[in-house]
Amino acid sequence: MKIGILLPIFSLPSKYGIGDFGDEAYQFIDILKKYPISYWEILPIHECGQYPYSPISYYALNENFLSLDRLIKMGLLKEVPPKKKSSRIQYDDYKERYYKEAYQNFVENEEYRTFCENPKIQEYARYKSKKTGEEESYYLFLQYLLDKQWNDLKAYANQNGIEIIGDLPIYPNFDSCEVANYPQYYQLEDGKMKYVSGASPDYFNAEGQKWGHPLYQFDEMKKDGYRYLLERYEEFLRRFDKIRIDHFRAFDTYYKIPIDKSAKDGFYVEGPGSDFFDKLFMKTTWDRFIVEDLGDIRPETEALRDKYHFTKMKIVQYTIDCQKKKDDYEDTTNMVIYTGNHDNNTIMGWYQHLSSQEQENLQDFLKEQGCYDSRIHLAMIKYCLKSIANYAIFPVQDIMGLDESARINLPGHELDGNWSWELLDFHDFEKSMHSFEEVVQSIFPS
């Protein structure tokens, strides 16, 4: 079994209000390489709207992740005062003045000019320039440095035995470079959305979810062999070692909600299915992908997943029945098992919401599985490690045993706390990793 850690870039410790591609990311890799860790799952890193799964571009990287410390090392900045510390991520324009200062100090070189020839980045720069009035060259400059910093960080991770798992969100934001430049590939009427994306009611949310993204016009994509989507996949395969495909269900059947109705008023429509994946697998291999196959999926979705040997997901918070003392989901080898991910409560938060009887039942179940530990988060990690799955991935919060105040997102709710959890420093995390290693050694003695 290969083990991974889940921590978004934005949740890294930072002097400037939000995690980035700077020194702290390298420190995190330095910690991981001391332990039997093979993967770092980072969530989306592309320029987005209000939240990470709402991209503005699938090619431009998130400006928040540009490291000021790295710009200082390049000689583009002299000194940047640290921002006043907060317990949560601060989404604001604190870095912007320093980006502009670095832009004024930047001297073009051949590497930069070659990068600027990328038509997708040119489209993005034009889109942003029209939005803000800033020069297109300013956005080309930011994206050049983001690309450079990301490539350096990924290379450092790979050199230290850590592969990167990146997330590929299913739909872009409506107000985005994608829709602005390729409206023919989206279901629009007079440039507006009549139907939007979402999810049907399921165990994530009894009311369903209304995400509000534009839906794809798959019939139009089919005419040119899905070139628009295939180019995106090629980009992500270049960026990451493995890709987690968000909302895999939509490739089988996607949920379509009238824009003026609730999620419960939506309905399913056939997606592209094998027609798209047959073309994708002319360019790559199945082992580069993990599919998010959670929620209410039908047998046809599972058949599509298994036809291409996609690695599936299991989240034990959803599969362990704390009343009947059993796990309702049978493990397979080609699977990633998680204690939780970005849309779940932390293990401790989840456990604290169980009734006293359910807590007792869970403890009995874990003892029966040979996973007893008085520290429930470590007992749950041990349970995952004993699975026959080929991969196990654990959020940093679950390794540290943090409560629900450390959860990343509550789906279907627009809360200030969503996407704002920050690991304040590495001290407590490193201490927790020692206990984590003991658990790993108890399952896989070296």
Image (cartoon, rainbow, N blue to C red):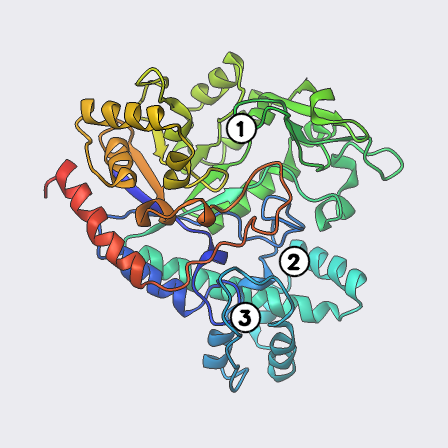
Q: How far apart are marks 2 and 1 (CA)?
A: 36 Å
For the residues labelled 2 and 3, the Cα–Cα distance comes to 15 Å
Residue 229 visible in the snapshot: yes
Cα distance in 3D space between marks 1 and 3: 46 Å
Please, what is the three-letter code of the amino acid marked with disc 3? Glu
Q: Determine which quarter of the picture holds residue 259.
A: top right
Residue marked by disc 1? 204
Q: Dot 2 corresponds to which residue?
A: 121
Question: Which amino acid, by three-letter code, is at mark 2?
Answer: Ile
2 or 1: tag closer to the N-terminus:
2
Amino acid on which the number 1 mark rests in the picture: Phe
Q: Mark 1 or 3, which is nearer the eye?
A: 1
Tell me if residue 95 comes above or below residue 279 in the rendering.
below
Q: Residue furthest bottom?
A: 78
Which residue was labeled with disc 3?
Answer: 111
41 w.r.t. 140: above or below: above
2 or 3: tag closer to the N-terminus: 3
In the image, 437 versus 380, the foreground residue is 380
Tag 1's secondary structure?
loop
129 relative to 157 in the view: left or right: right
Q: In which quarter of the image is the N terminus?
A: top left
Q: Which residue is drawn at 67% across and 36% down?
A: 211
Indicate whether 216 appears above or below 40: above
Residue contact between numbered discs 1 and 3, judged by CB atoms under 8 Å? no
- Tally of numbered discs: 3
Q: How crowded is mark 3: few (under 14 residues within 10 Å), some or many (20 or more)?
A: few
**Secondary structure at numbered mark 2:** helix
Q: Where is residue 441 in the image (x, y as percent from the top left)?
A: 14, 43
